[in-house]
Amino acid sequence: MEAEFWNERYKRKDYVYGEEPNEFLRSQLKPGKGEWIFPADGEGRNAVYAASLGYKTFSFDQSSEGKIKALQLAQKKGVSIEYEVNSFEKINLGKNRFDGAVFCYTHLPLTIRKSAYTKILDSVKDGGRIIFEAFSKKQVEYQARGEKSGGPQDISMLFDEETVREAFPNVKFDFIETREVNLSEGEFHRGKGHVMRFVGTVAHEKHGR
């Protein structure tokens, strides 16, 4: 979706996905050090949480309104985050910079998903950690029956295990699962939904890097 859509959504006073981190991220990320990247981080709730655990965080999103809200939230929580307004196509991240990456509902069109995900993974060090949660392909069934848990209506932007393994070829999976969840993340992630999750380790050397 275009920046205008997300700017319109994020310019509201309230935090449309809430101020608290994603629950799966909360369950997986423990206090520590190092720098983590948060692509498409919106209003910044997840990076702010990671910063509160001691991590250096770098977020980016195409929404300038998202950045404003993220920096306000960081100030409220008494932490510092780095946030750049940019697109997946244009951002320059370099190689082997980050110690981990959080993909939290990072749904992208098929036309850019492979290149965008590759760019993020290349920016993570060998042995770096990946935490991922997004809607599964079954989410369209929840949308059809009127659940308000959200997600793209284009099934090609949703995930199953095969799609995840194809999208992350240089990740060694600690575990991977699909499951029903009851979301309570602001106005747009509320109610029953179906998600794809994994935690894994980047293994560039396995693929000739």
Image (cartoon, helix red, strand yellow):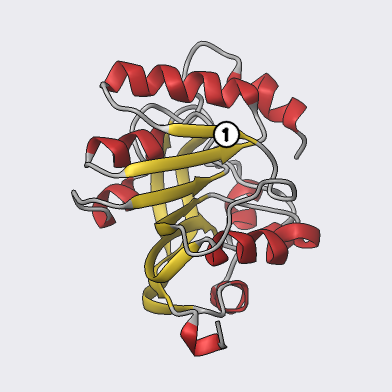
Residue 107, image x, y percentages? 63, 52
Give residue 118's quadrant in the image: bottom right
Q: Nearer the viewer, residue 58 or 184?
A: 58
Residue at which label 1 appears? 84
Residue 6, image x, y percentages? 67, 29
Residue depicted at 39% across the width and 32% down the height: 81
Callout 1: SS: strand
Give residue 64's quadrant in the image: top right
Q: In the orientation shown, which residue stands out farthest toward the top?
A: 13
Residue 122, image x, y percentages? 56, 66
Q: Is residue 158 visible?
A: no
Count of marks placed on residues = 1
Q: Is residue 122 left or right of residue 17?
A: right
Instruction: State whether residue 208 is above or below residue 106.
Output: below
Residue depicted at 67% across the width and 58% down the height: 116
Q: Is residue 9 visible?
A: yes
Residue 125, image x, y percentages? 43, 67
Q: Nearer the viewer, residue 168 or 105?
A: 168
Where is the N terminus found, in terms of image quarters?
Answer: top right
- Disc 1 residue type (three-letter): Glu
Q: Is residue 108 left or right of residue 99?
A: right
Q: Nearer the viewer, residue 67 or 193?
A: 67
